[in-house]
DNA sequence: GCTCACCTTTACGTGAACGTGAAGGTTGTG
DNA sequence: CACAACCTTCACGTTCACGTAAAGGTGAGC
């Protein structure tokens, strides 16, 4: 039985976290300031110490910010209650009670489901916007086709539009 | 021949534009300030006057900002060179020359194609993020299933997960 | 031609999301 | 234990995307 109570979770200091996430240390501290994440631990001399789950969370926050374009406030809503996560982390670490674990896990399940719902709503709006722009492209091509007809000029074969049989 | 040179394009003042786009007048002026759009015309007393194409453009900008989450700088890149659009508008209004119209239209075509490419790249990143979160959900459900097995308790039938045969 | 609602420019204010020192404490390696 | 490299907490500065007056001009109806 290899050291059950303290398996050496490999904690990182803020600079290493910054390097791996592509964020600045200032940004990481700022995210803590606005309640987006608390480091897993602090050293004796108050250094912030982050674990793997913090890393993932920061990557996720970065994606939500850069890829999805959410504001930090929206991200806060999406991740919903960092304090609860922190309590759950404690609980999970200190219990092997399956009932406790189940509580934590089902809670996580509904939260992740909500996240997916919000992201898919955003994806849907983006898709519909793309549809609009596609339609605009169609109209433009229609006008070009009109010109082609008016001039009795056959349309130039466009290499970027191989299947233009419509 | 019903008045070919001035068909009465129904120009709107900034307040009406604000009402129809859901933006504020300040925002519309600000977008002009940063070069996102110029009103189609000005009145004698320097009132801004917008046409239908301005309306569409503002709606598009709003979508890019709210739905896609782009910054105004990125939107500027996407819409690429308002000045060119302005020149084209002039040209298009003053010529019936099919060659000129073709130039304008093919130019618009490539620009809209670029816009679609950028939007689809963004949609792809969003989709991949959703995949990641789906995977996380899968892992969470896996852990719950483990607990179910360990307790020899049959899993509670989840109405939100009809096809959980994995 | 007066009036009122709408418009103009100019300019300072604001909240979000950090950047950038300053002043000092911590770690770990020689 | 010295010392460089990292960390800490303030705290002020900055850019973006507007909000919000202030001071005055415009336009349509009576």
Image (spheres, coloured by chain):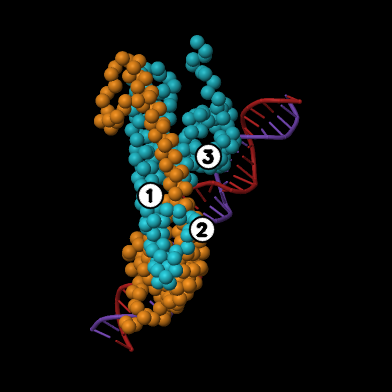
Chain colours: A cyan, B orange, C red, D purple
Residue designated by label 1: A127
**Rendering coords of residue B157 (x, y %):** 26, 25
Return the mark for residue A12.
Answer: none
Local SS, label 3:
helix
Question: Subunit of mark 2?
Answer: B
Indicate the quadrant where residue B58 lies: bottom left
**Mark 2 = which residue?**
B77
Q: Which residue is mark 3?
A: A28
Do residues under tags 3 and 1 come within 8 Å of each other at their CB atoms?
Answer: no
Q: Nearer the viewer, residue C26 or A95?
A: A95
Which of these two is toward me, A39 or D1?
A39
Label 2 to label 1: alpha-carbon separation: 20 Å
Q: CA distance from mark 3 to mark 1?
A: 32 Å
Q: Foreground residue, B49 or A72?
A: B49
Question: Which residue is drawn at the image coordinates 28% and 32% (left, top)?
Answer: B160
Residue A4 lies, in percent from the top left, at 49, 15
- Count of marks placed on residues: 3
Single out the mark in the foreground, 3 or 1: 1
User: From the image, which quarter does the C terminus of chain A lie in?
Assistant: bottom left
Discs 2 and 3 share one subunit = no
Front label number (2 vs 3): 2
Which residue is rendered at x = 34% and y = 60% of the image?
B22
Count neighbours of disc 3 (C-alpha within 10 A) and say few if under 14, some if 14 to 19, many if 20 or more. Answer: many
Q: Say what secondary structure mark 1 lies in.
A: helix
Instruction: Give the residue at x 35% y 22%.
Output: B145
Dot 2 and dot 1 within a common chain:
no
**Mark toward the start of the polypeptide (3 vs 1):** 3
């Amino acid at each position: 039985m290899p050291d059950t109570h303290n398996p050496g979770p490999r904690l990182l200091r803020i600079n290493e976290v910054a390097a791996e996430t592509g964020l600045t240390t200032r940004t990481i501290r700022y995210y803590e300031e606005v309640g987006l994440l608390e480091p897993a631990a602090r050293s004796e001399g108050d250094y912030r110490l982050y674990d793997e789950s913090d890393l993932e969370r920061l990557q996720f926050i970065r994606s939500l910010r850069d890829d999805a374009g959410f504001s930090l406030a929206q991200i806060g809503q999406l991740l919903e209650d960092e304090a609860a996560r922190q309590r759950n982390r404690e609980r999970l670490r200190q219990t092997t009670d399956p009932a406790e674990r189940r509580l934590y896990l089902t809670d996580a399940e509904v939260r992740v489901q909500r996240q997916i719902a919000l992201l898919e709503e955003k994806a849907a709006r983006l898709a519909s916007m793309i549809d609009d722009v596609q339609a605009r492209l169609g109209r433009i091509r229609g006008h070009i086709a009109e010109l082609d007809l008016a001039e009795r000029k056959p349309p130039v074969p466009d290499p970027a539009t191989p299947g233009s049989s419509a």
